[in-house]
Amino acid sequence: MIHAENLEKYFKKTVKQPGIAGSVKSIFRPKTELVKAVDGISFHVDKGEILGFIGPNGAGKSTVIKMLTGILSPTGGSCIINGQNPQKNRKRYVKEIGVVFGQRTQLWWDLPLTETYTVLKEIYEIDDERYKKQMQFLDDVLELAPFIKSPVRTLSLGQRMRADIAASLLHNPRVLFLDEPTIGLDVVVKDNIRKAITCINQEEDTTVILTTHDLDDISTLCKRIVMIDHGKKVYDGSLYSLKQKYGQMRELVFEAADKSALDTLHYEAAFADRGLEEGDLSVKTEGTMFTVDFNTDKIPVEHILNYTLGQTHIKDMNLKDADIEEIIRRLYKGDTEERGRAHE
């Protein structure tokens, strides 16, 4: 469905020289340099797959998405979506994709939502029967009825996001690009949006590319992720494999019988002979509550438990796997260290 091969994108950046003279010179004889925003990224997405496309700010995610949607042309490489070239077959291509940007809207601000959809119906040349059927499906999934006659400017953020997703799906696209679809939403609305995306994917077999900083979106919706950093792909695989490779961290949370445990529990000293590195062991305390994060490659679970239970009386205890945020942080850390060694 989606084939991106060695995508590259350069941007020209004006370099301003210091001082007033430099400012004047930059007006008449500007000095520019090329900045590589995307560096040889390749990946493929099957029909009906939900792909999480993630990375830190400035990693190049938005640039890649803009090339895939046809907004930008790649400097090098190519992308083909459902047999279409986004840049060459622009008019035909946009009829096969839907795009939602969390911070922007494609809705007409002062029109009632129902009239906005009527305008989009004409733009996409949707016949009456197909439009009626699709609107019924979108209302069932996204619960549009309570606010569909309201002007867009009166909608809450959660309502507007549901309305934007519906607008992007009105023409039943083969591919849906979602850029931060849950940003700024409360927990309940986020959960509803995720359920709607899952339903749309399953019912319509819609291929979805999701970019987000909300890692709950990733763990709920995506089985596979592509991660990029500094314009390069650093991971492409299943969420399960990522957890297996970088998920050695576990978290032990327990409540001690009293504050005297502070005087008896000394994890760093107890495991000082394990060759611990930064991030392998950390302890946080709040009253009688303890949180111990530890790397099971260095300290097995049973050793942590045996030491804790042997040192103090425990009222309650919970052992958890590392969450996705911790796993991704460790992946980024490892990739940064590898790049640093490569430059040495």
Image: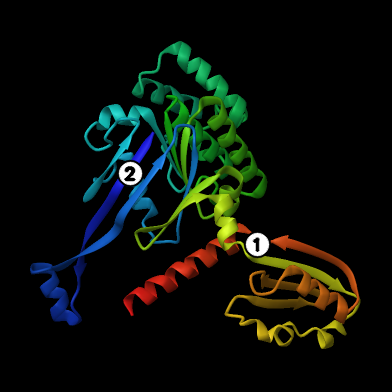
Q: Residue at x 83, y 66 (%)?
A: 317
Q: Is residue 111 shown to the viewer in this render?
A: no
Image vertical order of residue 137 relative to residue 296, above or below = above
Q: Distance between the residues labelled 2 and 1?
A: 32 Å
Apparent side of residue 217 relative to residue 41 in the rendered image (left or right): right
Residue 253: x, y in percent?
A: 77, 68
Q: Tell me the tag on residue 4.
A: 2
User: What amino acid is labelled 1 in the image?
Assistant: Ala
Image quadrant in which the N terminus is located = top left
What amino acid type is highlighted by mark number 2?
Answer: Ala
Disc 1 target residue? 322
Q: In which quarter of the image is residue 139?
A: top right
Disc 1 is placed on an element classified as loop
| Picture coordinates of residue 167, whole percent (x, y) | 46, 31
Mark 2 / mark 1, whichever is N-terminal = 2
Other-residue count near label 2 (Cα within 10 Å), few / some / many at <14 / 14–19 / ≥20: some
Q: Where is residue 300 in the image (x, y as percent from the top left)?
A: 71, 70
